[in-house]
Image (tube, rainbow, N blue to C red):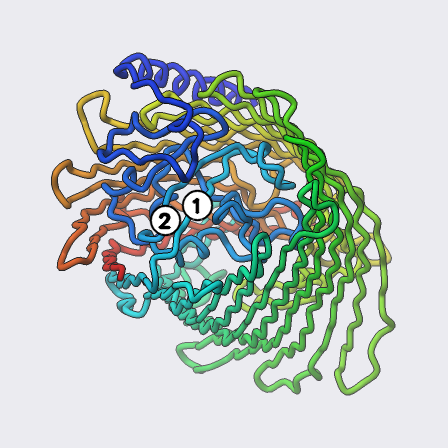
């Protein structure tokens, strides 16, 4: 704890002291009139790329299109990614639709449905972007948004499109030649449209030595393992925006994807003592998934015309069909195939959400919104375990359902030019049900039904003592999202572990608090510090299972009464103009986190399973003035906490740091071409497993492995039309 505090204070002091020096070194910025500071999309963009001509103040920082010209962007994502100190966050994986969402707006409107911000921005041609304004979310009157929010203003330029191709090469792995994306968009009358086709393919692999030692350090087995993991994710999407008349807006988003995955791990094992084995094993797994999403919304004036009353109707549906198979085979040098196991599973998942929002503005700088949301989620699983020379059991079937409803009332208010506040409160009702069929040819078990009522809400405030500093605080009561797979038992053939499902799981809840300091020093130099903490109840983790004699027989995913987590995130952006290095930018990040939970088996305090311990990164880019060339590098390092189970402690460790460097030319026959070399520091995927008896009291063996994955060569060719 002492070391953590010293590190936090040291990091804050170092960055805070360095940035004011940057500010003092700047030349005095030219004065801005009110139009330049606050006009938003009507701002007359400067013709040069001087950072000092980006407008800061009023309710945000304004970035004209000319600011991004030096990067030769192809999409809106390329542009937003270059805003100093700004980081995109999405609503992916959150419970339902709810308030807030991504911290990106398109023409002042939230991104509809659950479409990720990165995905949506990558579909917008940079040629259609008029400007980007970064504002404080609390001041927008949009429930749930706080901190920095980027509002991208676009215009109709007729039919346009973007495309990119991203091949990748590395030793001992097949070349990845199929990763590509293309988008065509435009407007026809009052209808805007966009069509995208892409394949997010990957070709990964690693290999290396593993050692197995007894508790006393005696080496009893060595292994050489080779892993190959190939996947293709082709998909198409279509987005439509219809504006039949003033203040009427309808959105429709359609998406279809396939995911085809094949992985294998070959292990050649050599015994060094009688405790080891000499054999070869092959573990492989495959998935052949398809999924589709339909989401839509329609907003129009409703009631209270004098108070800008608007009603928004939102619908969302997602379905996923995922057949998977895992195989584990053991080959003996003398006997041949001795063990052959198969685990088959077919999972169907669906989520259906309907949401209604009514908002009105009774007075200037005051906004209200009342919302009602209902959801129905389910997971259907049929699984079967098959072993060589053993009559297989009948397939098992399980179904988990959740019916959920929530209502919230949110109020946003501008108290003064320096203060914005937002308060939201509501309740959530959910009903969880599960039915298992040990043999799908027989009668199901009785249905298990449970229901809950949970309060939820938040309070957020932003204080702006001047145009260069924003301090945002937020306190939130959050209800977590359960994974329905945790309700159902499964088998890991690779680790020889059974995971027991838990029909008594309840959603995790937490009180979350954070305070964010966002300082701009002008000229694109920024510093941000976020301090946060969480008080968690019903933490979803691993818990032991006991028999009638109170003897541990296994473990399952379950709820632990309480836990806590807190940390600090630091980020800084430095531009090189004031030191005579025009066109350079350095982005720095440091994240430190501490968590605590009582281990349900050992009774001691430990970190949350697989929780972040630390992360740091440094990214440098130099756009060489008066040329089409750019170059740069990126490096990072992360450390995660171990994962505790009934008889193992598993610790995944990426032995880095990770490093990459690139060189880019922005006009090769009208295309942008980028070449990148990655894994500069020869990092490796390392793993350590300590194996104990049931109950984790006596250590029996230790498994240590390190797998290298060689240098990676990546290319990106992109264009726009």
Decide if residue 603 is on the left or right side of residue 390.
Answer: right
Relative to 234, is 89 above or below? Answer: above
Q: Residue at x 71, y 78 (%)?
A: 396
- Label 2: which residue? 129
Q: Quadrant of residue 100?
A: top right
Quadrant the C terminus occupies? bottom left
Residue 604 appears in view: no
Expressed as whole percent of the image width and height from the top left, the position of residue 464 reads 54, 21
Q: Is residue 300 left or right of residue 48?
A: right
User: Could you tell me if the residues under marks 1 and 2 are in contact, i.e. CB atoms within 8 Å?
Assistant: yes
Q: Which mark is residue 106?
A: none
Q: Position of residue 173 (x, y in %)?
A: 29, 66
Residue ID at (38%, 14%): 17
> Left of 175 or right of it: where is 280?
right
Q: Is residue 479 above or below residue 176?
A: above
Circle 1 sits in a helix, a strand or a loop, which is it?
Answer: strand
**Which residue shows up at 24% across the image and 54% down it?**
711
Measured from the top left, where is residue 559 in percent x and y? 74, 48
- Rendering coords of residue 121 (x, y %): 42, 53
Q: Please indicate whether residue 574 sits to the left or right of residue 214 in the image.
A: left
Local packing at callout 2 (Cα closer than 10 Å; few below 14, some 14-19, many 20+) is many
Alpha carbon separation for disc pair 1 and 2: 7 Å
Helix, strand or loop under label 2: strand
Decide which of 134, 404 is in the foreground and name it.
134
Which residue matches tag 1?
152
């Amino acid at each position: 704890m002492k070391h953590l505090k010293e590190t936090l204070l040291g990091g804050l002091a170092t960055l805070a002291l360095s940035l004011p020096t940057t500010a003092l070194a700047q030349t005095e910025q030219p004065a801005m009139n009110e139009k330049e500071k606050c006009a938003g999309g009507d701002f007359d963009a400067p013709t040069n790329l001087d950072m000092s001509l980006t407008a800061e103040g009023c309710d945000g920082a304004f970035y004209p299109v000319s600011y991004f010209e030096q990067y030769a962007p192809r999409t809106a994502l390329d542009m937003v990614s270059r805003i100093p100190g700004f980081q995109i966050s999405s609503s992916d994986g959150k419970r339902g639709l709810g308030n807030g969402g991504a911290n990106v707006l398109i023409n002042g409107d939230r991104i509809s449905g659950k479409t990720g911000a990165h995905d949506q921005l990558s579909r917008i041609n940079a040629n259609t972007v008029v400007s980007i304004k970064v504002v404080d979310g609390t001041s927008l009157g949009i429930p749930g948004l706080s901190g920095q929010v980027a509002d991208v203003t676009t215009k109709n330029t007729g039919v346009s499109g973007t495309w990119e191709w991203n091949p990748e090469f590395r030793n001992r792995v097949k070349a990845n030649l199929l990763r590509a994306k293309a988008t065509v968009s435009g407007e026809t009358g009052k209808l805007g449209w966009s069509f995208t086709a892409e394949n997010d393919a990957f070709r990964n692999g690693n290999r290396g030595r593993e050692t197995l030692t007894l508790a006393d350090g005696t080496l009893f087995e060595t292994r050489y393992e080779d892993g190959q993991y190939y996947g293709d994710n082709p998909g198409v999407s279509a987005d439509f925006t219809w504006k039949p008349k003033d203040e009427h807006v309808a959105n429709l988003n359609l998406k279809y994807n396939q995911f085809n995955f094949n992985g294998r791990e070959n292990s050649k094992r050599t015994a060094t003592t009688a405790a080891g084995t000499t054999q070869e094993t092959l573990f492989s797994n495959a998935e052949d998934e398809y999924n589709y999403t339909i989401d839509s919304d329609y907003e129009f004036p409703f009631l209270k015309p004098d108070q800008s009353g608007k009603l928004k109707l939102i619908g969302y549906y997602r379905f996923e069909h995922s057949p998977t198979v895992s195989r584990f085979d053991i080959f003996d040098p003398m006997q041949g195939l001795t063990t052959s196991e198969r685990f088959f599973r077919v999972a169907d998942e669906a989520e259906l959400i309907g949401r209604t929002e009514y908002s009105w503005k009774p007075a200037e700088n005051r906004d209200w919104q009342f919302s009602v949301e209902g959801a129905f989620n389910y997971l259907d699983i049929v699984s079967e375990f098959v072993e060589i020379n053993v009559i297989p059991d009948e397939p098992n079937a399980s179904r988990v359902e959740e019916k959920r409803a929530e209502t919230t009332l949110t109020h946003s208010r501008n108290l003064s030019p320096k203060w914005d506040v937002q308060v939201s409160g509501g309740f959530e009702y959910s009903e969880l049900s599960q039915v298992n069929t040990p043999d799908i040819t027989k009668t199901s078990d009785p249905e298990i039904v449970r229901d809950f009522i949970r309060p939820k809400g938040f309070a957020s405030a932003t204080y702006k003592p001047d145009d260069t500093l924003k301090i945002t605080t937020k306190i939130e009561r959050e209800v977590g999202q359960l994974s329905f797979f945790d309700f159902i038992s499964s088998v890991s053939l690779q680790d020889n572990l059974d995971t027991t499902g838990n029909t008594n799981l309840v959603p995790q809840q937490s009180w979350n608090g954070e305070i964010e300091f966002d300082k701009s020093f002008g000229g694109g130099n920024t510093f941000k510090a976020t301090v946060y903490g969480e008080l968690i109840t019903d933490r979803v983790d691993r818990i032991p299972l006991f028999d009638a004699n109170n003897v541990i027989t296994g473990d399952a995913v379950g709820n632990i009464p309480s836990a806590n987590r807190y940390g600090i995130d630091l980020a800084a952006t430095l531009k090189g103009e004031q030191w005579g290095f025009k066109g350079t930018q350095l982005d720095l990040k440091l994240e430190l986190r501490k968590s605590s939970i009582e281990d349900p088996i050992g009774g001691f305090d430990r970190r949350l399973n697989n929780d972040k311990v630390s992360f740091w990164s440094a990214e440098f880019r130099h756009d060489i003035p008066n040329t089409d060339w750019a170059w740069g590098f990126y490096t990072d390092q992360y450390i995660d906490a171990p994962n505790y189970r009934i008889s193992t402690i598993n610790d995944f460790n990426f032995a880095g740091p990770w490093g990459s460097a690139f060189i880019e030319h922005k006009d090769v026959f009208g295309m942008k071409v980028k070449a990148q070399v990655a894994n500069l520091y020869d990092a490796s995927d390392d793993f350590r497993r300590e194996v104990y008896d049931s109950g984790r009291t006596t250590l029996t063996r230790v498994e240590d492995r390190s797998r290298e994955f060689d240098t990676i060569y990546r290319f990106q060719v992109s264009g726009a039309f």
